[in-house]
Amino acid sequence: MRYEIKNGKNKTYYFKNELKEFGCQFKKTGKYSGYWYLNTEDQFLANRLQAYCLKKGLTFLILESSYSRNAHYRADFFANNKPIIKNGKPYYRCVYCGRHFQKNQITIDHLYPIHKVKNSSFRNINRKLLKKLDIEDINDCKNLVAACSSCNKRKSKKTGLWLIRGYLGKYPLFWKIAYYVLILSLCLGVFIMLFN
């Protein structure tokens, strides 16, 4: 399990020596910001650290490893998803916009964002939703999709319509239907403009 200690009523800076004694390490996230963390399976140590943080007015977070980004999710995605072969070259389709990209140009996105199950105030509801979708781990291949970098940045930690686009965009039939609907609507628009 991973435990994070952040500023609460008091700042962690004033308790850095005590946190080091617990075995915590500091993770710098900005010029003047960061948090302390501890990775351990020792429940007794974790309970002592939690009691200490509560007593000193520090924020104590318990993070399950199944809801954190792992180091090999990209390799797992490519191992389980075969590319589209086009002109003798392998391509992956962005599930959000439908464009094709080579492996080195594509990013791998967590369809259901990590933030929603890790740090969100509705994390318990989001975790239950993941379980209903039969996703036990946030890095499960069912939750990983290929996305171009611009779509991935635009999606960020959003859900809603982005989730629907992501789930439907996995299927090639969706893109064929989408292109036909687009062409049909353009033709209909031109027809209406000409005969009005």
Image (tube, rainbow, N blue to C red):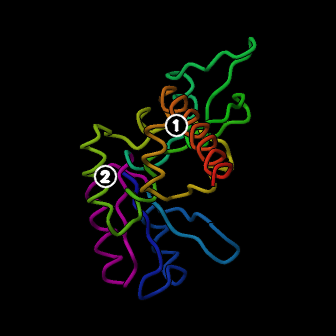
Q: Which residue lies furthest to the front in this view?
A: 195
Three-letter residue code for mark 1: Val
Q: How crowded is mark 1: few (under 14 residues within 10 Å), some or many (20 or more)?
A: many
Q: Which mark is residue 145?
A: 1
Q: Where is residue 17 in the image (x, y as percent from the top left)?
A: 51, 75
In the rendered image, residue 63, in percent from the top left (x then y), is placed at: 37, 57
Q: Between residues 141 and 98, which one lies in front from this camera angle?
A: 98
Q: Which corner quadrant of the image does residue 48 belong to?
A: bottom left
Most distant residue in the top direction: 88
Mark 1 vs mark 2: in front:
1
8 drawn magenta:
no
- Circle 2 sits on which residue? 42
The mark nearer the N terminus, 1 or 2, is: 2
Q: Give the range drawn in magenta.
A: 39-65
Q: Quadrant of the rendered structure where residue 142 is? A: top left
Contact, CB < 8 Å: mark 1 with mark 2? no
As drawn, the residue found furthest toward the bottom would be: 9
Label count reads: 2
